[in-house]
Image: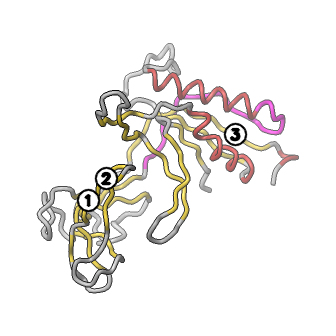
Amino acid sequence: MKIPKLILSRPKLVIDTKCPKCHSMDIQALANVELTCKNCKTKFTSDVQLNIVFTTAKKFLQLRANNNEFWVLGKRDDSEVFNTDEMLKPRSKMEDDIYHSMLAYKRICEMEGCYDVSEVTNDYDIDYKIRCNECGVCFNCVICTRCGERYTPEKINTPQGVQRRYKCPKCSSRDYTRTYINKIAKVCPGCGSNNIQKTSFSSDKKQCPRCHSENITSPKKVPVYKLIVQRQGRFKL
């Protein structure tokens, strides 16, 4: 049985979005924002420092309402070195924020009176973000789905920042698909750009879902804080 998880990490700005192309509505998290200084007009990128509990509260409420059990996991540093006398002691400002957010969620569940809540423990989680070593995708050029023309979208400066305009130079269609590369290389064989990445997918599959190669990376063990929340018997869904 798969247990649903709420994973706490670096807080991000969460916004509602609507795709201008397909009109799909979603929620996106922003790690940083592009800003312009009001004094000297210098453009710069700033990290978004937000409260972890506030930015994950919606997901937490969804898990709590729809599941008899779920886990709250807080990402720790990748270091394998721990103080055996104080395994839970945060080793950075980020870990300290995550640890206290875990304690906040623990108190919230305990105050509800209908959950059995574990102590916060040090554990490991499996990261199933897998990459294929055979195929990839180019993030510079696209392929028109109407006529098959390969082109690089035009970049336009707007008040909201630089945006890409997807319009085929051959047939003017705005429908496109990413340029997939069957054999990964340092540059895209179509446009020569080095802005390419290996095909990635989140799964426990033994082969790439696109090219079916078994030459893929292995899941990683990630050190985490762990909190288990279980609905008491008489309150189960």
The answer to which of marks 2 and 3 sits earlier in the sequence is 2
Residue 92 in the image, given as x and y percentages of width and height: 43, 21
Indicate which disc residue 171 carries: none
Residue stretch rendered in magenta on the structure: 110-127
Dot 3 corresponds to which residue? 229
Q: Indicate yes or no whether the magenta region holds residue 125.
A: yes
Are the residues tagged 2 and 3 within 8 Å (C-beta)?
Answer: no
**Picture quarter with the N terminus:** bottom right
Residue 148 on image: x %, y %: 25, 83
Mark with earlier residue (1, 3): 1
Location of residue 114 in the rendering, given as x and y in whole percent from the top left corner: 83, 39
Which residue type does callout 1 highlight? Answer: Lys
What secondary structure is found at the residue carrying circle 2? strand
Give the number of the mark in front: 2 or 3. 2
Q: Name the residue under label 1.
A: 155
Residue occupying the point 61% across, 34% down: 53
Q: Say few, some or many: other residues with alpha carbon within 10 Å of mark 3 (under 14 / 14 to 19 / 20 or more).
A: many
Residue extending furthest toward the right = 234
Q: Nearer the viewer, residue 132 or 221?
A: 132
Q: Do the residues labelled 2 and 1 touch (CB within 8 Å)?
A: yes
Three-letter code, disc 3? Val
Q: Which of marks 1 and 3 is in front?
A: 1
